[in-house]
Each structure stands twice: as structure tokens, then as C-alpha cells.
Image (cartoon, coloured by chain):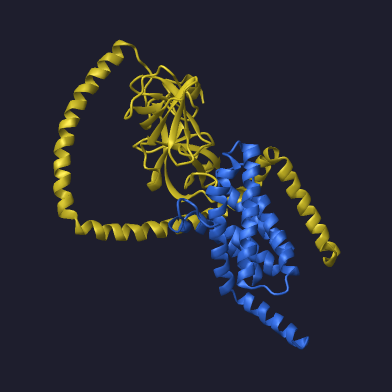
Chain colours: A blue, B yellow
């Protein structure tokens, strides 16, 4: 079941990103569905799943981008590992914490990409890129990712497990 | 943190981290390997993109047909007026064409603007927010290669930067990483056309004494690989002449509407075979 879900994400997310999301973008900035998916997979499934899906989704994203540095492969893998580690060590995940972590990781990933693109591909200035691309996209990612997390059945299961754990400790 | 992981998991993490480090440290060396490895994945992922676009196009088509019916009478009258105007212009142009042919024959002007093109449909936008690009539904299998120019009937769109078996990625002329040589049609001053962060284009490195005016047309010079000479890039909007600078520049509005691209032409052979003996040999 999980493999089928992951396969459909690999096949379906990029088509949605390059076509359907053009209607929801503001000033040409769209949320990054692969980043949100990688974060949620890593956060709920662990660092290995996050890393592998980050590599695969980042690779597919790079295949349909004008960039030639495979930057998404690196940044999405990084997001997958970090989200896995966060998910493993965070006792009580709420939509607010997910929103915060997603925003921070999106900014981190975007800033890494901006610096790398500046060094390797002679991109525009990093502050300008952070202001015009990274921050708006991070806001988008955090908002959309939180809504998806809120709607996910796995989240409820995880929270109920947490509630049972608390009950065992007599709280 | 890593102590909690099993031995196998740690090994997988280590190997993948090593792989990522190689890609990170040697991005330019690994790009061709990754591109080759990704081709089958790109071929599979392209079909959902095309299916989605077909669905989107049919929905838009249905709505446009409905909207068009509501204004068909008014449009018809307008079209008749336009037709009369165009017939007059056509007559003038025929005269000019005859004169041009005569003069060209006189000057033994052999080079003809007949680039070979492949028509392609725009099926999506770049998958990231870093580049201004579009995805076309034609790729390697249709003879499309990186560095080929892309245009519409209105003017230049951009150039192909990446190809997959069934699709290709085009970097638009408004992207800051695109550079095309252009000339001002009226004054014949040459410069480099680059995109700007604001989504327009700019012609740079124009001589300080160049006589440029707002409204001047900028066309391709033919010196950049993928484009023949004389295709419209855009119209000059404003000029910038900084004190102490050796060159001047001008902001350009692209002639092709890059926000509403649907069909484009990929220039596979920029010059006619008669004009390019090298291409003829191939």
C-alpha cells in the first residue's frame, strides 16, 4: 500500500507541479509539492524513507527543470533526512510545529540552493533570491503542508498513539 | 541521534550521503550521468503531464467555445473590417516583395530565411521557482537538441536547455540566464539580449553612440547558434545610459506573449540548406 502511494507520488506530483499549480501561483511563485511530500514522508516515515523519496522526487523535479546542477536532488534528500530526524525525536507533533518546521526547512533548502546557484551558475544576488523566491515559497509550503498534514489519517493515528502513551504514564 | 538506527540503516544512510556528496561537490561532472540515468524516469513521468494538459486544454476549449458563441456576431463584423484592411496591406506587401526579389537577385543575395522547424505544444512550466522555463511535448525522439532556438509567429521565445525522450525544457528569453545576440533593426547596432529579474529582457553592450529610440525593434543577429538572422525579439521600452559606462543598454518588451504560450516552433536548422553548406553535408 505504502509502495503504491510512493509510486503514485513520484508519477503524479511533478505533473501537478508543472501544470495544475500554475493557477495557484502568486507573482510566479508556486508552492513546492515535492518539498512538502518529502518533508511529510520523512517526518512520518523516518529518515531512510524521507531520504530515498527526497532523492527520487528531487531527481524527477530536476529532469523537468531548466537547471542543470541537480540541486533539487540534494536539497530534497537533505529535507528527507532532517524531517526524519525531527519526526523521530519530537514527542508531540501538532500542526503548529509542522508548520514551523516546514517553513524553517523550506527556507534552509531554498537558501542552500540560492548560495549554490550563485556560486556554480552565476545566479543573481543571494539576498534578492531569498527575498523574491525563498521566503514567499516557504510561506506557501508551510501553509499548504500544514493543511495536508491536518487532513492526513496518519497524523490522527500518531496523535492517538501519543495520547495512549500519555495515558500509560498516568497523565 | 544515529545510534538509534540499525546497522543496515546506517550503512544505507552512509552510502546515500556519500552519493549526494559526490553530486554536491562535482555537480558539473555528474550532470551527464544523472541526465542519462533519469531518461527512463522522465519518459514515464511525461505521460501524466501530457494527460493533464490534454484535460486542461479540453476544459479551456469548451469554455472558450461557449464564450466565443456569445460574441460571434460582433467578432464577425470586426473580422470583416480587419480582412479589408489586411487585403489592402497584402496588396502593398506583394508589391514590396516583388521589388525585394528583384533587388535580391541583383545583389546575388543567396541566403534565405527558411529555417527548418518542428511544431511543439507547451505542456507545463518549469518545476521550480528558480527558472523561467516551459516544458514542450517534443524531445530527443523528434530531433530536438539542447541549444536549439524556440519561437512563435510573433517572435523569439527562448532556447532548449534540456531534452528527454518525449519532452524538452525551454529557458525563456526573459530568464536572467539566457543570452542571445540581437541587433536594433533600424540602426543595426548589436548587443546581447538577457532576461531581467522583473520578467522582461534587456539588450546590453550597445555602443555609447548608438542611436536607439523607444519603439525600436530588436531582432536576432544570427550569431547565436540556434537562431537565424532577423527574428523579432521585442520592442525597446526605455534606454539606460549610465555616466562613466562604456556601453548603454535598453529594456525590451518581448514580442511573443510568454505568459500565454501554447504552440511554439523549435528551430532545428537555423539556416536554409542552400545557405549553409555544412548543414547540407549532414
Q: Residue at x 37, y 35 (%)?
A: B155
The total of numbered circles placed on residues is: 0
Dividing the image into 4 quarters, which one contains the N terminus of chain B? bottom right
Front residue of A132 and B167: A132
Please name the residue shown 18% across and 35% down the image. Answer: B86
- Left or right: A16 as drawn, with respect to B1: left
Name the residue at 43% across, 57% down. Answer: A23
Is residue B211 left or right of B245 when viewed as pictured?
left
Residue drawn 68% across the image and 50% down it: A74
Residue A79 at x, y = what percent? 67, 57
Relative image position of residue A148 (x, y in whole percent): 56, 69
Asked if residue A4 can be seen in this view, the reply is no
Q: Position of residue A98 (x, y in %)?
A: 63, 67
Residue B106 occupies quadrant: top left
Q: A146 or B273: nearer the eye?
A: A146
Instruction: Judge from the rendering whether residue B2 lies leftward or rightward of residue B82; answer left or right.
Output: right
- Against B40, residue B52 (above or below) is below
Left or right: residue B31 compared with residue B15: left
- At which x and y percent is residue A85? 74, 64
Find residue B83 and report its image quarter: top left
Q: Is residue B238 visible?
A: yes
In this view, B219 is above or below B56 = above
Q: Is residue B74 placed above or below B100 in the rendered structure? A: below
Amino acid at each position: 500500500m505504502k509502495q503504491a502511494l510512493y509510486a503514485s507520488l513520484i508519477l503524479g506530483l511533478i505533473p501537478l507541479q508543472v501544470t495544475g499549480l500554475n493557477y495557484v501561483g502568486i507573482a510566479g511563485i508556486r508552492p513546492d509539492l515535492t518539498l512538502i511530500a518529502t518533508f511529510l514522508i520523512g517526518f512520518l516515515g523516518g529518515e531512510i524513507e524521507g531520504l530515498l523519496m527526497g532523492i527520487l522526487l528531487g531527481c524527477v523535479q530536476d529532469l523537468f527543470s531548466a537547471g542543470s546542477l541537480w540541486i533539487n536532488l540534494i536539497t530534497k534528500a537533505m529535507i528527507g533526512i532532517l524531517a526524519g530526524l525531527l519526526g523521530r525525536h519530537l514527542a508531540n507533533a501538532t500542526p503548529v510545529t509542522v508548520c514551523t518546521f516546514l517553513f524553517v526547512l523550506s527556507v534552509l533548502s531554498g537558501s542552500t540552493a540560492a548560495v549554490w546557484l550563485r556560486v556554480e551558475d552565476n545566479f543573481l544576488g543571494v539576498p534578492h533570491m531569498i527575498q523574491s523566491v525563498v521566503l514567499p515559497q516557504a510561506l506557501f509550503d508551510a501553509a499548504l503542508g500544514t493543511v495536508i498534514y491536518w487532513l492526513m489519517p496518519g497524523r490522527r493515528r500518531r496523535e492517538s498513539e501519543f495520547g495512549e502513551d500519555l495515558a500509560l504514564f498516568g497523565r | 541521534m544515529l545510534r538509534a538506527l540499525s546497522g543496515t540503516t546506517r550503512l544505507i544512510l552512509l552510502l546515500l550521503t556519500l552519493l549526494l556528496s559526490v553530486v554536491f561537490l562535482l555537480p558539473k561532472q555528474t550532470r551527464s550521468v544523472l541526465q542519462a540515468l533519469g531518461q527512463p524516469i522522465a519518459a514515464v513521468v511525461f505521460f501524466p503531464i501530457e494527460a493533464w494538459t490534454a484535460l486542461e486544454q479540453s476544459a479551456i476549449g469548451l469554455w472558450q467555445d461557449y464564450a466565443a458563441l456569445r460574441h460571434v456576431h460582433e467578432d464577425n463584423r470586426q473580422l470583416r473590417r480587419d480582412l479589408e484592411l489586411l487585403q489592402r496591406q497584402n496588396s502593398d506587401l506583394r508589391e514590396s516583395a516583388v521589388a525585394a526579389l528583384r533587388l535580391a537577385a541583383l545583389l546575388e543575395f543567396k541566403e534565405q530565411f527558411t529555417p527548418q522547424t518542428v511544431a511543439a505544444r507547451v505542456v507545463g512550466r518549469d518545476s521550480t521557482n528558480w527558472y523561467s522555463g516551459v516544458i514542450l511535448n517534443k524531445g530527443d525522439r523528434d530531433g530536438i537538441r539542447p541549444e536549439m532556438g524556440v519561437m512563435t509567429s510573433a517572435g523569439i521565445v527562448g532556447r532548449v536547455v534540456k531534452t528527454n525522450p518525449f519532452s524538452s525544457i525551454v529557458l525563456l528569453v526573459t530568464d536572467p540566464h539566457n543570452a542571445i545576440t540581437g541587433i536594433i533593426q533600424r540602426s543595426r547596432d548589436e548587443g546581447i539580449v538577457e532576461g531581467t529579474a522583473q520578467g522582461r529582457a534587456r539588450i546590453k553592450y550597445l555602443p555609447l553612440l548608438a542611436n536607439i529610440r523607444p519603439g525600436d525593434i530588436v531582432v536576432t543577429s544570427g550569431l547565436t547558434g540556434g537562431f537565424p538572422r532577423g527574428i523579432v525579439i521585442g520592442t525597446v521600452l526605455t534606454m539606460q545610459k549610465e555616466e562613466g559606462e562604456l556601453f548603454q543598454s535598453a529594456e525590451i518588451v518581448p514580442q511573443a506573449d510568454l505568459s500565454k504560450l501554447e504552440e511554439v516552433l523549435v528551430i532545428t536548422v537555423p539556416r536554409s540548406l542552400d545557405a549553409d553548406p555544412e548543414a547540407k553535408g549532414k
